[in-house]
Image: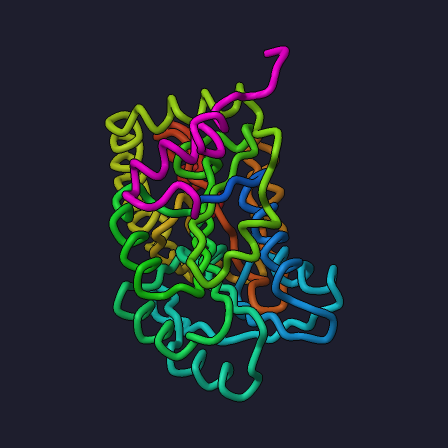
Amino acid sequence: MSFYTRVHTRGVKSIITERLAKEFAVPESGILLGYGAEDLLKQAVACFLGAGEKLMIPSYSWWYYKEIASEVGGVNIEYPLIKGKDTFSYDIDGMMKVYERERPRVVFISSPNNPTGNAMSPEEMDDLLRVLKDVPVVFDEAYWYNSQRLQVRRLLEEYPNILIVRTFSKYYALAGLRIGFAFVGEGLKKLEKMSHRYLGFNRLSEEVAVAALDSPDYYARVADQMRCDKELYYRDLGSLPGCTVYRSEANFILVEIPNAIKSPLKDHCMKRGIVLKFMDEPLLNSHIRITLGTGEQNRLVINAIQEFFG
């Protein structure tokens, strides 16, 4: 490891971009790597958003979205999500109205969305992208699942103004590698030039990432187990008085609880060594966001919450 990678002699950026190009059947030149997905989101904003310009983000979203525009003097404009009985969904008509009214310079879409867990369907993507054809559209798909591989190529071919951002942190459970990757449309080549790393990437991280890509059967089994465990949460916590468990396409679930029990339930879990994210945001202040663990860990969380309710 005393020397830089030499893969550029083959005309590619890295062994990961070379492998991802094969995996998703897209040109290697249009795949970007970053220090996690966070880095790629920051690069996109720095590249396309200027002072006083608007970044359009979900009303329910990762707190980082609300900070990133301010780093370049930009302004956040929020678009709505619809809260249903047991799921959230994107308000496509509402998003279009916000876009027409505000004319943002960049649009962020998180699918699956953090922390609500809902994803955008291919049909919804098409309806929206036909309207947002004149601005960079960044799809944050950090919580993607491996089955969505074929959608990437079609979107890039039909919509040149999109950037699809993913990571090895969630599905592959390799957050410590700090490797994000993105597929960039032909209309956003400016970002490709900005993100280029002339001396390559961390060679150890690359090898581990490729090993993960070489293990599809293992990760498919993990994904199946997560789907089963989410059903346990829906059933066992959804039956508790005053609780709503929202259906999720990600590796976490969002649980709405009576606000009066928020503090004592947090104390109850902490005493049992269980650390959960109790939300404290304007739109989500009576909610717990629970990241899925092993089957045993998930059962411990469910049992502890059931015990609290007696």
Residue 305 shows up from this direction:
no
Query: Residue at position x 51%, y 83% from top?
Result: 98
Image quadrant where one finds the N terminus? top right
Query: Residue at position x 27%, y 57% from top?
Result: 154
Closest to the observer: 152 or 273?
Answer: 152
Counting from the top left corner in percent of width and height, residue 62 is at 57, 56
Q: Is residue 212 left or right of residue 206?
A: left
Residue 75 shows up from this direction:
yes
Query: Residue at position x 41%, y 57% from top?
Result: 111
Query: Residue at position x 37%, y 74% from top?
Result: 128
What is the basis of the colouring in this image? rainbow
Counting from the top left corner in percent of width and height, residue 200 is at 57, 29
- Specify the quadrant of the image occupied by residue 112: bottom left
Q: Answer above or below: position of 131 versus 141.
A: below
- Specify the quadrant of the image occupied by residue 20: top left
Task: Please state the extent of the stretch shown in magenta in the rendering.
Answer: 1-30
Q: Is residue 140 left or right of residue 227?
A: right
Counting from the top left corner in percent of width and height, residue 105 is at 58, 73
Q: Residue furthest top?
A: 2
Judge whether residue 284 is colored magenta. Answer: no
Counting from the top left corner in percent of width and height, residue 201 is at 57, 29
